[in-house]
Image (tube, grey):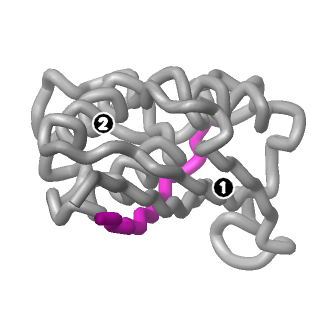
């Protein structure tokens, strides 16, 4: 049996914050604003995985109104989401993330991102896809006001 989920997240770029994407810190002039470390790609991935099993969304499980998640490392949130999936008898089949941003350049970091996510999810790296694209200067990502990410996840279990 297989199930598929989809996730999407957006965070505003601001000065004075670190930029965390797919569990790694990137050098950049701006970082993402959020209650946690604001790792937009991991947040979209968590929503995709949770959605595959109709387990609501990341905000339900890790609300930004709860002080214990202030500054939280999103890798911890992803690990907890994967634990919840496995606790229900499911396994991660594959994941695919698309990051939408004008800057920084992601291509040099894609392999490290994939390895970090695979490590956190306890899966083989070949089931983790990370891609990045610009929006050709259009919209809030094109104006460099924020970064968006979308993700899909397939989970499976023996029938």
In x, y percent, where is residue 35?
Answer: 31, 36
Q: Is residue 39 above or below residue 133?
A: above
Quadrant of the image occupied by residue 125: top right
Q: Residue at x 59, y 24 (%)?
A: 116
Quadrant of the image occupied by residue 102: bottom right
The quadrant of the image that shows the N terminus is bottom left
* Residue 109 seen: yes
First in residue order: circle 1 vs circle 2: 2
Q: Is residue 36 above or below residue 139?
A: above
The 10 Å Cα crowd at callout 1, few under 14, some 14 to 19, many 20 or more, is many
Q: Is residue 128 above or below residue 27?
A: below
Residue at the far bottom: name it: 138
Single out the mark in the foreground, 1 or 2: 2
Magenta highlight range: 1-16
Which residue corresponds to mark 1? 99
In x, y percent, where is residue 141?
Answer: 68, 64
The 10 Å Cα crowd at callout 2, few under 14, some 14 to 19, many 20 or more, is many
Instruction: Give me the disc on residue 82.
Output: 2
Left or right: 83 with respect to 32? left
Query: Main SS of the magenta segment?
Result: strand
Left or right: 52 with respect to 116? left
Quadrant of the image occupied by residue 50: bottom left
* Residue 17 seen: no
């Amino acid at each position: 049996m297989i199930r598929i989920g989809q996730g999407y997240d957006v965070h505003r770029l601001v000065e004075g914050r670190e930029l965390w994407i797919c569990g790694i810190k990137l050098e950049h002039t701006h970082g993402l604003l959020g209650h946690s470390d604001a790792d937009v790609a991991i947040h979209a991935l968590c929503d995709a995985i949770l959605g595959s099993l109709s387990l609501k969304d990341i905000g339900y499980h890790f609300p930004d109104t709860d002080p214990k998640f202030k500054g939280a490392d999103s890798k911890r949130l992803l690990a907890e989401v994967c634990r919840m999936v496995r606790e229900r008898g499911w396994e991660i089949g594959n994941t695919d993330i698309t990051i939408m941003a004008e800057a920084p350049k992601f291509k040099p970091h894609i392999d490290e991102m994939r390895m970090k996510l695979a490590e956190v999810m306890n899966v083989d790296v070949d089931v983790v896809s990370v891609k990045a694209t610009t929006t050709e200067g259009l919209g809030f990502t094109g104006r460099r006001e924020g970064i968006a990410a979308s993700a899909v996840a397939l989970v499976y279990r023996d029938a």
